[in-house]
Amino acid sequence: QVQLVESGGGLVQAGDSLRLSCAASGRTFSSYAMGWFRQAPGKEREFVAFIRWSGGYTYYADSVKCRFTISRDNAKNTVYLQMNSLKPDDTAVYYCAAKRTLADYSSSYAYDYWGQGTQVTVSS
C-alpha cells in the first residue's frame, strides 16, 4: 500500500516556475515507478511525465518536453516535478501516481495509487 500526497501548487504568472512534490508513505517507494498527470476543467486526465524506479529513465508528454523535469529522491520517498516557462494551458490539477510495472506508463488506468492532487493556475 502506498499513500501519496502532493504539494507545491499555486497561482503564478506565465513564464514563472513551480516545483511540485509528491511524498509517498511506505518502505517500498523505490520499487514503484512514478508518474505525473494533470486534469484541466472539462478535460480528461492527461499524462505529463514518468520516471522509473531508479530514476534512470524519464518520459514526457510532448506538450511539456524541455519545460518540465521529473526527478525522485528515494531516500526521501519523494518525486518532484520542476515546471519552468509555465503557460496558461498548464493550468490544471496535478496528480502523482505510482505503479509497479513499466507498461503503459502514459495511461492513467495502469497506475495503482494516486494522490489527491494539487492545483496549478497560470495567469496570462
Image: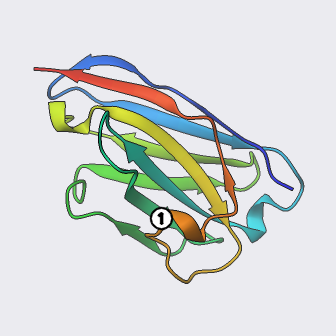
Lateral position of residue 43 relative to residue 82, left or right: left
Instruction: List x then y, in percent, for residue 75.
Output: 76, 52
Is the C terminus in the top left, top right, bottom left or bottom right quadrant? top left
Q: 99 or 73, which is in the foreground?
A: 99
Is the N terminus in the top left, top right, bottom left or bottom right quadrant? bottom right
Q: Which residue is mark 1?
A: 50
Q: Within 10 angstroms of label 1, few (less than 14), some, or many (20 or more) residues?
A: many
Question: Looking at numbered disc 1 in the image, what kind of residue is underneath it?
Answer: Phe
**Residue 87 visible, this orientation:** no
Residue at point 72%, 56% (across, down): 74
Q: Is residue 81 above or below residue 120?
A: below
Lateral position of residue 8 relative to residue 47, left or right: right
Q: Is residue 101 above or below residue 68?
A: below
Instruction: List x then y, in percent, for residue 6.
Output: 60, 34
Instruction: List x then y, in percent, for residue 12.
Output: 27, 18
**Residue 91 visible, this orientation:** yes
Q: Residue furthest left?
A: 124
Q: 21 or 45, which is in the foreground?
A: 45
Q: 37 or 72, which is in the foreground?
A: 37
Residue at point 65%, 60% (across, down): 98
Q: Residue furthest front?
A: 42
Instruction: List x then y, in percent, for residue 63.
Output: 20, 56
Q: 30 or 37, which is in the foreground?
A: 37
Quadrant of res 18? top left
Q: Secondary structure at mark 1?
A: strand
Residue at point 71%, 74% (across, down): 100
Lateral position of residue 103 relative to residue 30, left or right: left
Q: Is residue 64 above or below residue 11?
A: below
Residue at point 82%, 45% (across, down): 25
